[in-house]
């Protein structure tokens, strides 16, 4: 056994007593986990039985726990690509039968899978091990005060440094940016995943578009960064996680504007660890956390949209749904008119090609 | 963990027959592998353990993007056929029918690098090399070459940071060791306070100081040294990385230097000058040699820490912020390519050993002292 695993085993032995009684959910921390705590745990029949623990994403720790045979987490909140790989590798348990039997149906009796398909999603193997959480999105935002005259409104504007001079904040990995570059290059947003998958040379096209703003870019790698960059005037526009922008607008009195065109929606899942110490309790919590009601509830605390289609009417029909009596839908990424100009990121394509594209992206950044 | 950098046995337990048949394929003669290979693959996908196949998929995708969905889609078609009890007469045709990528030799060539229990591919990948169809080592496609440049950058940054720490740390340590106690205690607090402060806080503070609309640029513009469009880019580039890392690692240089300098008797310098040396000469010939153990300890400490650094560079380095530590973390967490992770780690360890050996040759390892 490797040293890494031994160290992990040791740490797990120390931590085991704490994990034994409650369902441990590994999630991203910050405002996001807080919203999960309020929307899922606090509304659960036994709130004290759910304990959230922070992790930094990725499957590294998950695989280390499963391979060493000492699993301390029960549920993990993951990106779709990790849901797919984790489920394929058996790091997450295949519970497709249980999901079909126990997951709450939609209001018209549609199954959870159908409910998600109604939201424009396609089946992938992550659905066998995981239940849906929320849509989040890579969105461009700006401070309207930075543009006294005409304001940018499209991806083409984001990539047009002549018309809107100033630096752009973009992240240091490729997901989301590649799709945006395609939109700026004239591809219909909804068609981007297909073009990327089918058209040879599509990637070259995206990188050629990225070249045009190369000298006007500030790169960020932590989610809080783009807000600081725009607020301090270091950049005039930036790509950010929409929840961060929503929080700044709703809680900190900022007045940021979004460019919804070309936003890249990504998914978020709650998956069951193989060998989870509290399997049954964890399953029960999964059913609760994936009801349309619970998903809509989460929108009260963070501007991420329900992945189940039937969660959206709950919000729309009960506005003002946001904190302090504000309407929340104007801040949500998945309204019909915004979805019409959005890209739903294709996790299967990214899990096929992500490693290679990220190397290329890093080489592009470095040159 | 190091073993993982050469181990390829898992996938060989999943596709033993396919690989065995594969080795018989005469690439000169036939463009595509013979029927037996297709048949073995069909059977091993049809009756193999789902989870083992899943783990093999992750590995296969490192050799060529697209393996994952190719195998998954094919598996689905195969399982359907097996369920209906409709075994094909011609496996090759069946697979190509299921997915035309099976008629694409590039996938078959990519399989060549996994058919043995041991592999050196991860080490080659770690220095931007890969295998071609004949399994010769060739350069990675040009637009994917990142690791060599990153290795050079990592070494460069670590060496610079070590040198800067030495230049800045030496006078401070000297003051600490020679000032009267009440001043030196205060000074010591100035050294230790940042040392105890969270890494992220210090990093963020540097961003506030250095950014274009930040404190330093602001003051310079206000003083009229710079005009408003001439603000200097001091952060989100290599300069920012060097400044922030130097400040963060400085205590690791100062403290060993200090503890060594403290015990150098003051009488040595006086004696040297008494015997006719100018102060500079006395410092050079008498004082400096006695601080070498402290410089060595501090230098090694700073260098070792710097070479594996990645959080600070990622935050302040912008596009230049990806050092080798970032890639190790990326492959460990995101791509799950633990073979490459291990290879990168092993090379890093190799560098350390080389530096250690060089150091031992030049300075001598007995000469290191923390006080």
Image: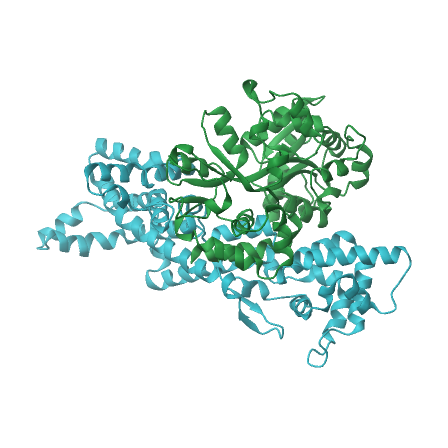
Pick the front one: B45 or B87:
B87
Q: Is residue B55 left or right of residue B369?
A: right
Q: Colour of chain A?
A: green
Q: Colour of chain B?
A: cyan
- Is residue B82 visible from the viewing direction of this image? yes
Q: Residue at x 81, y 37 (%)?
A: A100
Residue B346, x across and y down, in percent: 52, 59
Q: Can you name the residue that lies furthest to the front here?
A: A150
Look at the image and tell me in which quarter the C terminus of chain B lies: top left
Q: Is residue B175 left or right of residue A204?
A: left
Q: Is residue B119 left or right of residue B96?
A: left
Pick the front one: A61 or B133:
B133
Q: Relative to B206, say whether B114 is above or below.
A: below
Q: Residue at x 71, y 81 (%)?
A: B29
Q: Can you name the residue that lies furthest to the right here?
A: B85
Q: Relative to A281, say whether A65 is above or below.
A: below
Q: Can you name the residue that lies furthest to the top here?
A: A325
Q: Residue at x 55, y 41 (%)?
A: A261
Quarter of the image for residue A196 reads bottom right
Q: Residue at x 71, y 44 (%)?
A: A122
């Amino acid at each position: 056994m490797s040293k890494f695993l031994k160290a992990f085993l040791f740490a797990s032995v120390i931590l085991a007593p704490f994990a034994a009684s409650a369902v441990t959910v590994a999630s991203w921390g910050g405002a996001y986990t807080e919203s999960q705590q309020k929307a899922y745990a606090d509304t659960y029949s036994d709130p004290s039985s759910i304990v959230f623990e922070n992790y930094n994403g990725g499957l590294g720790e998950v695989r280390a726990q499963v391979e060493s045979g000492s699993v301390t987490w029960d549920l993990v909140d993951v990106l779709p690509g990790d849901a797919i790989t984790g489920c394929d590798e058996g790091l997450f348990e295949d519970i497709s039968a249980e999901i079909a039997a126990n997951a709450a149906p939609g209001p018209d009796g549609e199954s959870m899978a159908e409910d998600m398909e109604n939201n424009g999603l396609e089946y992938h193997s992550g659905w066998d091990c995981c239940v849906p959480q929320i849509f989040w999105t890579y969105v461009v935002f700006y401070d309207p005060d930075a543009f006294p005259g005409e304001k940018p409104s499209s991806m083409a504007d984001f990539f047009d440094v002549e018309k809107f001079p100033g630096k752009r904040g973009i992240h240091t990995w490729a997901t989301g940016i590649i799709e945006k570059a395609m939109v700026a290059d004239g591809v219909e947003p909804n068609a981007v995943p297909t073009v990327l998958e089918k058209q040879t040379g599509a990637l070259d096209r995206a990188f050629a578009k990225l070249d045009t703003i190369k000298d006007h870019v500030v790169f960020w790698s932590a989610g809080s960064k783009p807000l600081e960059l725009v607020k301090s005037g270091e950049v005039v526009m930036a790509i950010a996680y929409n929840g961060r922008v929503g929080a700044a607008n709703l809680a900190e009195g900022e007045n940021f504007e979004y460019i919804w065109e070309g936003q890249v929606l990504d998914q978020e899942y709650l998956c069951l660890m193989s060998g989870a110490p509290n399997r049954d309790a964890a399953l029960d919590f999964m059913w609760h956390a994936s009801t349309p009601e619970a998903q809509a509830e989460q929108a009260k605390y963070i501007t991420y949209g329900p992945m189940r289609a039937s969660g959206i009417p709950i919000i729309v029909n009960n506005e003002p749904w946001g904190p302090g009596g504000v309407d929340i839908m104007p801040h949500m990424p998945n309204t019909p008119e915004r979805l019409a100009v959005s890209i739903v990121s294709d996790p299967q394509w990214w899990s096929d090609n992500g490693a290679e594209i990220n190397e290329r992206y890093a080489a592009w950044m470095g040159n | 963990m190091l073993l993982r950098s050469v181990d390829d046995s898992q996938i060989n337990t999943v596709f033993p027959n396919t690989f065995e048949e594969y080795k018989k394929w005469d690439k000169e003669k036939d463009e595509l592998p013979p029927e037996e290979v297709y048949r073995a693959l069909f059977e091993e996908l049809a009756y193999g353990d789902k989870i083992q196949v899943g783990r093999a998929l992750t590995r296969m995708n490192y050799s060529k993007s697209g393996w994952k969905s190719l195998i998954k889609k094919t598996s689905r078609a195969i399982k359907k056929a097996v369920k209906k009890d409709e075994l094909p007469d011609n496996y090759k045709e069946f697979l190509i029918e299921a997915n035309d990528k099976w008629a694409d030799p590039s996938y078959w060539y990519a399989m060549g690098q996994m058919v043995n229990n041991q592999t050196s591919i991860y080490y080659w990948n770690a220095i931007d090399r890969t295998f071609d169809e004949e399994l010769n080592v060739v350069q990675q496609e040009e637009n994917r070459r990142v690791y060599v440049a990153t290795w050079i950058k990592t070494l460069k940054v670590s060496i610079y940071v070590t040198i800067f720490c030495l230049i800045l740390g030496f006078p401070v340590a000297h003051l600490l060791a020679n000032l009267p106690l009440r001043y030196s205690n205060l000074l010591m607090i100035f050294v230790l306070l940042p040392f105890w402060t969270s890494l992220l806080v210090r990093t963020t503070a540097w961003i506030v100081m250095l950014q274009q609309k930040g404190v330093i640029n602001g003051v310079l513009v206000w003083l009229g040294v710079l005009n408003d469009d001439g603000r200097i880019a001091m952060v989100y580039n290599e300069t920012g990385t060097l400044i922030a890392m130097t400040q963060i690692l400085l205590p690791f240089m100062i403290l060993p230097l200090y503890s060594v300098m403290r015990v150098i008797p003051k009488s040595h310098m006086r004696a040297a000058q008494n015997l006719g040396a100018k102060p500079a000469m006395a410092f050079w010939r008498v004082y400096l040699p006695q601080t070498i153990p402290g410089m060595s300890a501090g230098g090694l400490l700073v260098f070792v820490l710097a070479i594996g650094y990645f959080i600070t560079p990622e935050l302040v380095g912008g596009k230049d912020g990806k050092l080798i530590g970032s890639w190790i973390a990326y492959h460990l967490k995101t791509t799950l390519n633990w073979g490459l992770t291990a290879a990168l780690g092993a090379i890093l360890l190799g560098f350390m050993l080389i530096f250690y050996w060089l150091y031992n040759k030049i300075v001598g390892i007995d000469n290191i002292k923390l006080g």
